[in-house]
Image: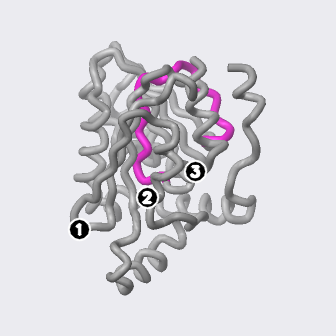
Amino acid sequence: MTNKKKQISAPAANGADLERALRHYDGLAPNYDYATRRIDGVRARAIAALRLRPGDVVLDAGCGTGFCFRMIEDAIGPIGRLIGIEPSPAMLARARGRVEDAGWNNVTLLNASGEAARLPAAPTAILFSYTHDLIRSRPGLANLFWQSRPGSRIAAAGTQLFPRWFFPGNWYLHYSHRGYITNFESFDAPWRILGEHLDGFTVSRQFPGERYLASGTLRAAEAGA
């Protein structure tokens, strides 16, 4: 574990890009759940792909407002544990309010990026729900994975480009996501780096075509917990 920790380097996004993204998400926080309601279905399918069980320790990496918490809590029960990390203070404040309103006592929330987070427990499952910059960050993934259990179940949902022939749709995706994403590299296959770390990796397009669902299990060599 020690060697892997020493290999972690700086975040992929530069400081200006990260600050811009954080300001954008802070502004979105009050209406984020309503504004993103059209992706509720793929969020739910990503959680289902984790095959959660009572007692699981789940990391919601880039948890935002905590929209996914209810579905996770229903699956892991009070004997499980939910850890959420989120770099946007305003988004995390919404998540904290959600936890307090529900009365969940098994949730730990951290105001941290994937590259900097220090987890209080080793996850057995990790959700990446619309966290494009994080799953494109090798340092971020390495940091989270070395703190996780071998064989942890991983699921990711997000946006990818339409097939190349549909260039008007792809232009729109670049335009509409410019405030959410700081790294458009490999926007045609944003899950590519994630797949390098997983066994049994699968990815599928979700209707209407610009959404994806990827899943697999963490290789023992990538984990450290």
Crowd around label 2: few <14 · some 14–19 · many ≥20 (10 Å): some
Q: Give the amino acid type for the residue marked by disc 1 in the picture.
A: Pro
Q: Is residue 189 above or below residue 157?
A: below
Q: Residue 15's x, y, as percent?
A: 75, 59
Instruction: Name the image quarter holding residue 167.
Output: bottom left
Residue 6 lies within the magenta run: no
Q: What residue did someone put label 3 on?
A: 88
Q: Which residue does the numbered mark 2 point to in the structure image?
A: 30
Badge 2 or badge 3: first in the primary sequence: 2
Image point (43%, 23%), residue name: 151
* Quarter residue 85 falls in: top right
Q: Residue at x 54, y 70 (%)?
A: 179
| Three-letter amino acid code of the residue under disc 3 | Ser
CA gap, disc 2 and disc 3? 12 Å
> Is residue 53 positioned above or below 59 on the image?
above
From the viewer's perspective, tell me whether residue 47 is left or right of residue 180. left
